[in-house]
């Protein structure tokens, strides 16, 4: 995000050049005749186009600005392009504008993730009204800036709206209809590179292959930087990019992170699920997530693979159920139609003969399962056709509660008995099982798109261990676990396809035409 912040500051410097230049031309008395009948010219940049007034250009040395125009009556319009989604700009602009001029009375409307509006006042004599409209199109945010003297700003806004109404984007990926039977993919990017450009390339490639749904993870401590103060920057980039590029989404808040409690805000560190302050803040955070992302989500889960944690902490089951029920109610106050549930690791329920643990979690609107067909030691030398029987058990055990599968994958590490060929066999067999049981499940999502890199997998693996655990004390099991985490992708770390990627695309196309 550091590079994104630099680009945003560059755009602000352009804004100041435009607004000050326009203000300077009308410093004493604005023209009584405003240029509402000015001729227009269509400006295009890639898939984006907009009709702009035929005014003189205003020079700019900033590379982000595509065009800047100013009228003799003190009105100004400029277009800049930034490689990011709009909401981070809407959050960032009010924070940095005061460093670049006498900005005040700033207001942000980011209720539409693809079209964010920021308005402010600038200067003292004359006072300028400034409106930024941030429009997403084809992998960029187009910053349309309008400015005029405050004494004439309402008239200018009527004119500016006609400019905005002309904006069009030829890149508008359609979002799939909601409903059962969507098959998707966890969009882990190549080279573990979560920069916006690489993330978007990942999403677009998956979309072009027919993927229409994905799943993501939210770390409480990353967002709540101070008590009930939320920094959505990274999650905005991640979730908004996927939404704006046509993906339906499910999301899990990791109050439980598989085998341990999820990371909390610093001031809650060490507090448990039954602590009143922990519970109050967790509920408030779940409601805030629903407020921020509820329109983008089909499913919101509380806790990831929680049964693995409860195997060693059975006394925490009831406190978690109480917290989850309260959080679900709070979410439904904000977004009444957003389904709320919990993620369970189905492979561990089967391995420990604890399928009965599903019952308490039917309190929610849906169940979510992960499933990995490894044997002890994370071995992938079993039957690639196993999923059909597992899916039947999911259907039976879920009863009347809707369920989705948010993770399912086959590791290819030779150290685990895995291979690209066996992964491809598993994909074919899994699609056959899904096709035979259409309508019985909500979504099925493969994990994942790209493999990890060894050091990153080791670092990620540590997040599953209790604090202070020395991974070397786990012996060979640690290496096997890292190999498992690192080789679940349909592509290698560097983006080179595995055999499974081509098979996945073929099977997905057949599945989608089989409705």
Image (tube, rainbow, N blue to C red):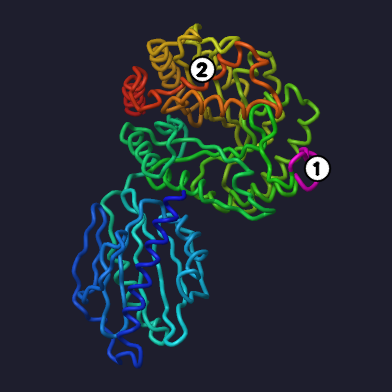
Q: Which mark is residue 133?
A: none
Question: Which residue does the image show at 70% across and 45% down from the upper left?
Answer: 266
Q: How many marks?
A: 2
Q: Which mark is residue 483?
A: 2
Q: Quadrant of the C terminus?
A: top left
Q: Where 227 falls versus 119 (above or below)?
A: above
Q: Where 37 falls versus 282 (above or below)?
A: below
Task: Tell me if I can see residue 468 in this picture.
Answer: yes
x, y percentage for residue 175?
38, 43
Which residue is nearer to you in this view: 501 or 432?
501
x, y percentage for residue 165?
31, 66
Q: Horizontal placement of 470 versus 392: left or right?
A: right
Q: Which mark is residue 275?
A: 1
Q: CA distance from mark 2 to mark 1?
A: 37 Å
Q: Where 65 falls versus 292 (above or below)?
A: below
Question: Which residue does the image show at 37% across and 39% down from the upper left?
Answer: 198
Which residue is nearer to you in this view: 13 or 196?
13
- Find out whether residue 274 is within the magenta segment: yes
Element type at mark 2: helix
- Quadrant of residue 361 within the rendered picture: top right
Q: Horizontal placement of 63 versus 292: left or right?
A: left
Which residue is nearer to you in this view: 493 or 177?
493
- Find out whether residue 345 is within the magenta segment: no
Question: Which residue does the image show at 42% across and 42% down from the upper left?
Answer: 195
x, y percentage for residue 499?
34, 17
Q: Horizontal placement of 493 versus 230: left or right?
A: left
Tag 2–tag 1 contact (CB < 8 Å): no
């Amino acid at each position: 995000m550091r590079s994104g912040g630099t680009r945003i500051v560059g755009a602000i410097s352009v804004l100041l050049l435009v607004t000050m230049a326009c203000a300077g031309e009308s410093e004493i008395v604005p023209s009584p005749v405003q240029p509402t009948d000015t001729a227009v010219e269509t400006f295009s940049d890639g898939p984006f186009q907009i009709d702009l007034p035929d005014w003189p250009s205003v020079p700019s040395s900033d590379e982000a600005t595509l065009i800047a125009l100013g009228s003799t009556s003190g009105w100004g319009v400029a277009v800049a392009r930034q490689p990011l989604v709009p909401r981070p700009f809407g959050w960032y602009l009010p924070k940095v504008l005061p460093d670049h001029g006498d900005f005040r009375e700033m207001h942000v409307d980011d209720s539409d993730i693809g079209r964010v509006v920021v308005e402010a006042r600038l200067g003292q004599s004359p006072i300028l009204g400034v409106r930024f409209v941030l429009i997403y199109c084809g992998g960029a945010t187009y910053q349309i800036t309008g400015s005029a003297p405050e004494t004439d700003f309402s008239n200018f806004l009527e004119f500016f709206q006609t400019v905005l109404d002309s904006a069009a984007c030829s890149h508008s990926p359609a979002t799939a209809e909601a409903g059962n039977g969507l098959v998707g993919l966890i969009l882990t990017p190549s080279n573990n590179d979560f920069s916006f450009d690489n993330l978007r390339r990942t999403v677009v490639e998956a979309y072009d292959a027919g993927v229409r749904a994905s799943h993501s993870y939210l770390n409480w401590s990353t967002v709540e930087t101070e008590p009930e103060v939320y920094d959505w920057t990274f999650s905005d980039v991640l979730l908004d990019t996927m939404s704006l590029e046509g993906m339906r989404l499910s999301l899990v808040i990791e109050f439980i992170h598989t085998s341990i409690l999820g990371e909390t805000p610093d001031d809650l560190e060490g507090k448990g699920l039954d602590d009143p302050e922990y519970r109050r803040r967790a509920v408030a955070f779940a409601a805030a997530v629903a407020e921020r992302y509820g329109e983008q989500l089909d499913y919101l889960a509380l806790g990831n693979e929680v049964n693995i944690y409860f195997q060693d902490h059975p006394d925490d089951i009831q406190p978690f159920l109480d917290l989850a029920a309260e959080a679900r109610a709070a979410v439904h106050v904000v977004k009444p139609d957003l389904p709320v549930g919990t993620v369970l690791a189905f492979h561990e329920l089967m391995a420990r003969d604890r399928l009965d643990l599903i019952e308490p979690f039917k309190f929610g609107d849906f169940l979510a399962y992960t499933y990995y067909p490894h044997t002890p030691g994370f071995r992938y030398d079993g039957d690639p056709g196993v999923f059909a029987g597992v899916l039947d058990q999911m259907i039976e055990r879920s009863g009347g509660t809707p369920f989705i599968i948010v993770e399912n994958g086959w590791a290819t590490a030779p150290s685990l008995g895995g291979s690209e060929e066996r992964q491809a066999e598993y994909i074919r067999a899994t699609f056959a099982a899904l096709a035979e049981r259409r309508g019985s499940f909500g979504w099925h999502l493969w994990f994942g798109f790209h493999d990890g890199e060894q050091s990153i997998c080791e670092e990620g693996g540590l997040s599953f261990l209790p604090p202070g655990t020395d991974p070397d004390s786990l012996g060979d099991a640690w290496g096997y676990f890292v190999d498992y985490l690192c080789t679940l992708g349909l592509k290698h770390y560097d983006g080179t396809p595995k055999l499974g990627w081509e098979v996945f695309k073929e099977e997905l196309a057949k599945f989608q035409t089989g409705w």
